[in-house]
Amino acid sequence: MSDPADLGVVEASEALRVRRLSSVELTEACLALIRERDGTHSFDGDPGSINAWVRVYADDALAAAREADGRLSAGGAPPLCGVPIGLKDLYAVAGKPLTASSRVLDEVPQRDCDVWARLRAAGMVLLGHLHTHEFAVGGTTDQVGNPWALDRTAGGSSGGSAAALAARTIPAATGTDTAGSLRIPSALSGTSTIKPTRGRVSLRGIVPLSASLDTAGPMARSLADCAPLLAVMAGPDAERAVTALARPWESAGARPFAGLRLAVSPRDGGVALDEDVAATFDDVLALVQRLGAVLVDAPPPEPREPGPEYLTILRADLAAYHRRFADRLDEYRPSLRQWVTSADAFPAGAEEYAAAKAARRRATAAWDDWLVEHDVFAVVEPTVAVVAPPRGDGYARAGSDFVLVALTQFWNWTGFPVVSLPSGLGRRSGLPASVSLIGRAGSDADLLAAGIALQAELGVPAPAF
């Protein structure tokens, strides 16, 4: 067998099930690669390190792996039992520090977040917490180096998760997404993710950016590996009773493209596509047509982009959470300090906030009606308009990451599910580009199945080490 750490979730799960590999062996292999590849674990990072990991819980991980091996030997263990995972540093783990990659937050939660409680019950092995852009308020995570090129950003805000996956130090990770924070780092780092339908995954116990816009989801090197993770992560949120109404999660298996109606994105996000992104996107469109898909060209509904109401909601939610740190503004990085103070400078009144929520409902309904009217299975668009830009200034000022969120944030506005997967390597840059499939609310399983079929044709890129 090659290095066990190279195994994806599905491969590792099967190797563990048939006892060709033990969880202790797999965990030790991942810990060894963290020591070899991640470099320093620090708040600011350094030019020579990936620095995906905030904290590594090696002793606890090995103890959990031994427990998982016992369950596996006894038979009847859940499919993910013994598989290592890293959690974005927003996910509460009882008795472990929770910092949101910030000097401001220094909590030790007394209970697990719902997602980790479900993953832990399934027997997954926690290796540690992974860096986020501070409090998830940004599309970069510039304390983290991109494994494809350390001078490039790994994206954000779930940058540590994407970088750890790309570096092969972990087969599975978690992230959150408020304006693109699952999809942006996956796109820039050559990994895969699904932003589930809003409400599919509980947010209870996860540090919020915007409680109204946040979505939690799985990250892995392939969509096939994201599927079993989401199956376990999905479940109701005690703080949001409506989530109990969600349909039970069902895997759709592989879905061929023959006959699928796909709409080429009628949006441009106000940004031009990098030539590598444009070229790989054209390649994907040609591929899906060869696979039998029908490309639909129809006038889009309005709005095509989120309006000022998006910021009304985000700023209000941000201010509500961060007011507890009002006496520690100097400890924030500059960009977050600007976001927090701007939220206080533009307070939303009750009527303005209600109007923003109503605008969001109208936009969601308009796009849902459009998908139904034109019998569109999914919108196809580039995930991010550029390949990974140089790291270094992502914390300089609020809004410096506009080009990264330009295409992604609208689908947080609607709450629709999105699968994102690598579309290839740029011929000019050699860096990953990415494509997304966006579908109606609740179509998560079908989108994953189509994405898995597409990824079987495109493959999964890996940086050289």
Image (cartoon, rainbow, N blue to C red):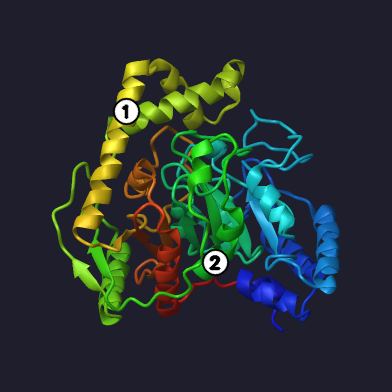
Q: Which residue is mark 1?
A: 356
**Residue 221 numbered tag:** 2
Who is closer to the viewer here, 212 or 98?
A: 212
Mark 2 crowd level (few <14, some 14–19, many ≥20, 10 Å Cα): many
In the picture, measured across the screen, residue 454 lies left or right of residue 287, that is right
Residue displayed at 52% across by 56% down: 248
Q: Quadrant of the N terminus?
A: bottom right
Residue displayed at 46% across by 76% down: 459
Q: Quadrant of the C terminus?
A: bottom right
Give the x, y percent position of residue 45.
Answer: 62, 46
- Single out the residue that lies furthest toward the bottom: 1
Give the x, y percent position of residue 89.
Answer: 64, 43
Who is closer to the viewer here, 191 or 121?
A: 121
Which residue type does callout 1 highlight?
Ala
Who is closer to the viewer here, 450 or 56?
A: 450
Q: Earlier in the sequence, mark 1 or mark 2?
A: 2
